[in-house]
Image: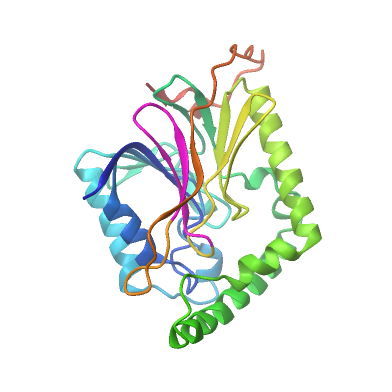
C-alpha cells in the first residue's frame, strides 16, 4: 500500500549513467503518492551522456512513470541542474505536463516558504572551473563503476544492504567535507537574504535535514550513492528517507532523519531588490 504525502523532492537521479539506481527509485515511487513532485536538478546527466550513454529499461520506466503521474494530476516541476543545464533554456515550458522552471518557491502545508534550487550556482568549481568539474565527474563515475563490481561481490557473499565506494571516499576526504560546509553556508545565506524560511536543494549528493539560525537547510541527496528523498507530510513536516535495495536483498525502509516540524518564526523582511521572475511562482 502506498503512503500519501503532500510533496516529494528528488534530486541528482543522473539518468543515462550506469550509477543511476533507477530500480530503487521506481520502488520508492510505488510506495509514495503525492500532490507535488519536485525534480531538483541533475535528473538527466547530459555531461556523462556526451561520453557514452547507458540507458536501461528501468531508467526508461522512471521517465514513463513520471509522465504518467503528471497526466493523472500530480503537479511535477523540474528545476535543471548543472548536468542537465541545457534545459534551463526552456524556463517556464512544459514537457508532457512536467513544468520546467529555473527555481521555485514552495509553500508547505504549515505556511513555511522554501526556495527550491539545484545549488550549482553556489559551487565555485562548477561556476568558474568547468574543466575541473568535468574531470572530477569522470573520476566519480569511475568509482561508481567499481562500486557496481563490489555490489555484485557483496551479493555473492550474501552481505546485506548497499555500500557505496564513491560515497565512502567522499566522506573521508577532508577537502570534500570542507566544501560541503561552505556550500551549505552559502545556500543558507542566500535563502535568508531572499526572506525564505528554508531552502531545498541537491547538487552535492549529501542528504541533510537541519535548521541553522532559523533557516531550514534541506538537501535531497541523490539516486546514485545514498538513494534518498525528501517528503513533505500532509501537515508540513519534512522527512528525509533513505530507500534500501530492492528484493531479494531489500531491507525494511529506513528513515535516516526523523520527520521535522520546523517551528514558526517571524517573517524575514523581503529585500528591496526585485526577485527573479520565477521566484514569484508559488502555490499554496
In the picture, which quadrant includes the C terminus?
Answer: top left
Per the rendered image, the range of residues in magenta is 226-242
The total of numbered circles placed on residues is 0
Locate residue 33, reporting x and y percent.
Answer: 27, 44
Asked if 211 appears above or below 13 in the picture, the reply is: above
| Left or right, 236 with reference to 202 | left
Residue at horizontal 76%, vertical 51%? 179
Q: Which is more toward the observer, 251 or 215?
A: 251
Q: Which is more toward the observer, 183 or 77?
A: 183
Residue at horizontal 27%, vertical 54%? 30
Locate residue 216, reporting x and y percent.
Answer: 59, 31
Q: Is residue 266 magenta?
A: no
| Left or right, 216 with reference to 38 | right
Locate residue 275, reporting x and y percent.
Answer: 59, 22
Q: Is residue 128 visible?
A: no
Q: Is residue 79 visible?
A: yes
Locate residue 187, reporting x and y percent.
Answer: 67, 37
Asked if 86 appears above or below 247 in the picture, the reply is: above
Asked if 138 appears above or below 206 in the picture, the reply is: below
Q: Which is more toward the observer, 42 or 192?
A: 192
**Residue lying farthest left?**
72
Which quarter of the picture shows residue 100? top left
Q: Is residue 231 magenta?
A: yes
Residue at horizontal 52%, vertical 29%? 114
Q: How is this picture coloured?
A: rainbow
Amino acid at each position: 500500500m502506498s503512503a500519501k504525502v503532500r510533496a516529494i523532492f528528488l534530486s541528482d537521479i543522473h539518468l543515462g549513467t550506469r550509477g543511476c539506481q533507477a530500480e530503487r527509485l521506481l520502488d520508492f515511487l510505488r510506495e509514495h503518492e503525492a500532490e507535488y513532485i519536485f525534480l531538483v536538478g541533475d535528473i538527466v546527466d547530459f555531461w556523462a551522456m556526451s561520453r557514452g550513454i547507458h540507458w536501461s529499461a528501468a531508467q526508461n520506466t522512471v521517465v514513463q512513470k513520471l509522465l504518467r503521474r503528471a497526466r493523472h494530476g500530480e503537479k511535477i516541476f523540474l528545476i535543471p541542474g548543472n548536468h542537465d543545464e541545457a534545459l534551463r533554456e526552456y524556463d517556464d515550458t512544459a514537457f508532457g505536463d512536467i513544468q520546467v522552471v529555473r527555481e521555485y518557491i514552495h509553500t508547505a502545508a504549515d505556511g513555511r516558504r522554501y526556495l527550491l534550487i539545484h545549488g550549482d550556482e553556489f559551487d565555485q568549481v562548477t561556476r568558474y572551473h568547468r574543466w575541473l568539474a568535468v574531470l572530477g565527474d569522470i573520476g566519480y563515475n569511475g568509482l561508481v563503476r567499481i562500486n557496481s563490481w563490489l555490489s555484485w561481490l557483496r551479493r555473492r557473499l550474501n552481505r546485506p544492504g548497499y555500500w557505496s565506494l564513491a560515497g565512502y571516499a567522499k566522506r573521508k576526504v577532508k577537502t570534500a567535507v570542507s566544501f560541503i560546509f561552505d556550500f551549505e553556508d552559502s545556500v543558507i545565506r542566500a535563502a535568508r537574504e531572499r526572506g525564505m524560511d528554508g531552502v531545498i536543494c541537491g547538487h552535492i549528493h549529501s542528504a541533510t535535514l537541519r535548521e541553522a539560525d532559523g533557516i531550514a537547510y534541506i538537501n535531497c541527496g541523490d539516486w546514485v550513492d545514498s538513494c534518498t528523498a525528501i517528503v513533505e507530510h500532509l501537515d508540513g513536516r519534512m522527512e528525509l528517507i533513505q530507500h534500501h535495495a530492492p528484493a531479494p536483498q531489500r531491507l525494511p525502509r529506513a528513515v535516516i532523519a526523523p520527520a521535522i516540524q520546523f517551528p514558526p518564526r517571524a517573517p524575514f523582511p523581503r529585500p528591496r531588490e526585485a526577485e527573479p521572475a520565477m521566484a514569484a511562482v508559488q502555490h499554496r
